[in-house]
Amino acid sequence: MMALTLDARTLQAPRYTRLLMIQSAPNRTREVLDTVYRSESRRILATLIRLLGDFDLAEDALHDAFTAALEQWPRAGVPANPRAWLVSAGRFKAIDTLRRRTRFDASLPDLAAHLDTAAQDPGEWDGDGVQDDRLRLIFTCCHPALSPEAQIALILRTVCGLTTEEIARAFLTQPATLAQRIVRAKAKIRVARIPYEVPTRADLPDRLDAVLHVIYLVFNEGYSASSGAAVTRHDLSSEAIRLGRLLAELLPDPEALGLLALMLLQDSRRAARTSTAGELILLGDQDRSLWNREQIAEGSALVERALSSREFGPYTLQAALAAVHAGAPTAEATDWAQIVGLYDVLARVHPSPVVELNRAVAVAMCDGPEAGLALIDRLLAGGALTDYHLAHSARADFLRRLGRAEQAAAAYQKALSLAGQEPERRFIEGRLRELRGPEKDSRRDVDLAPARSTRR
């Protein structure tokens, strides 16, 4: 999260330029405000959205509140409860703004009067209530009335605090297009009167699935970027893990725990997944001393906790698979039979072509490349993975290991034509060059397909 007093993006908008006039504020006060902004601004925004009922008005109120704090705290001192002070200041700034606009909209006086009489006790804006507000905000951003693209954009912008430029860059979209997507999402929430609330127990399973799915999509784009020069986008995977922690803390559902475990276990390998030159390193060839053992320990404990509930689903099962890999001291020590068994369960609970592809790779590791090849050929014949480069890459690897060099080269060429990420393209090109020289036959050369969901 950016620091308030040093964030050029915050200061460049006209209504924030007066922040530049108060850089002479005592350093201690500025440091406190920076800390509060980094740690509390998203919580404060969530509460302001609940109190004001409007995303844009709440965002303006948030920045107005911090502006007021920069002006007043150096003189009056830092309040005992900075969060409640900022919520109160933002709310009253919004009411003043609405009153100034009354001459343009006859409906605004009633709204201002309603806000003036609602939630007078600042104590209501702190503690558990704020935690509930953050949970409400997450579910609002992931309401099924919004498109998946809008859900992702809104949750990254509003809940995580990323700028439109950062989100657009991550998903290869023009900032203007991304900004319009966010504007339309906010308008949809306002016009459709989407409730700012946690769903009822009856509606929670479907709505929670949407929230988990959005977080998973954000993580996948960070774990294995769909295109570009880098294998990973650490900023996105970190934001997804932060969201997962928040959700698991506020709503410790077994699948929320499972998703957090999955992300931690997958991210634990990040430092070992590429060389210093940015080249892709497959799972079996990674230096396991570079794996993050703290993340593995935390993720494994969360997996056990989720599994013990006996109410787990696909995210927990995928996390269990990742935990088996994380627990193997070497590639050769991997319990592939257990992995095949877990994929059998996952395929029943959450059938998908990508699950079947990963299962085929695991079967090949247990029973040989010919068994895996038969499964992948059956999947490709079904048509669901025709344009999925990892399916063709895995097929090429099985053919290579079977000594069928010409067919392997054709499969690698197909994978190359579909791959968008530069390190993956270079890896496939390297495999094609190897086919012209002495053939290597190693079980270590196979990697599981990334956790990317076909529902994207």
Image (tube, rainbow, N blue to C red):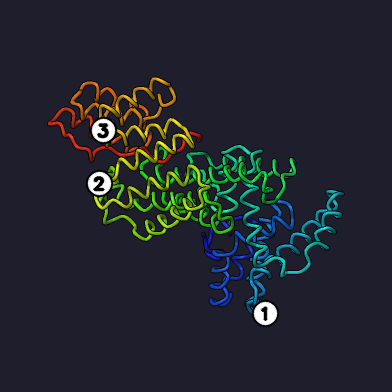
> Does the CB distance between marks 2 and 1 fall below 8 Å?
no
In the rendered view, does 46 fall on the left or right side of 433? right
> Does the CB distance between marks 3 and 1 fall below 8 Å?
no
Mark 2 crowd level (few <14, some 14–19, many ≥20, 10 Å Cα): some
In the rendered view, does 357 fall on the left or right side of 108? left
In the rendered view, does 285 fall on the left or right side of 39? left
Mark 3 and mark 1 lie on one chain; the one further toward the N terminus is 1
Seen from this angle, which residue lies furthest left?
438
- Looking at the rendered structure, the kind of residue marked 1 is Ala
Residue shown at the point (49%, 37%) measured from the top left:
349
Mark 2 and mark 1 lie on one chain; the one further toward the N terminus is 1
Residue shown at the point (50%, 34%) measured from the top left:
455
| Element marked by disc 3 | helix
The residue lying toward the viewer, choosing from 206 and 226, is 206
Expressed as whole percent of the image width and height from the top left, the position of residue 246 reads: 54, 57
- Looking at the rendered structure, the kind of residue marked 2 is Ala
Marks 3 and 1: which is nearer the front? Answer: 3
Mark 3 and mark 2 lie on one chain; the one further toward the N terminus is 2
| Element marked by disc 1 | helix
Q: Which mark is residue 76?
A: 1
Vertical relation: 412 (above or below) 4 = above
Vertical relation: 440 (above or below) 37 = above
Which residue lies under the disc numbered 2?
331
Which residue lies under the disc numbered 3?
367
Mark 1 crowd level (few <14, some 14–19, many ≥20, 10 Å Cα): few
Vertical relation: 252 (above or below) 19 = above
Q: Estimate the spatial distance between the alpha carbons at disc 3 and disc 1, rounded to whole Å.
A: 73 Å
- Looking at the rendered structure, the kind of residue marked 3 is Asp
Residue shown at the point (40%, 47%) measured from the top left:
320
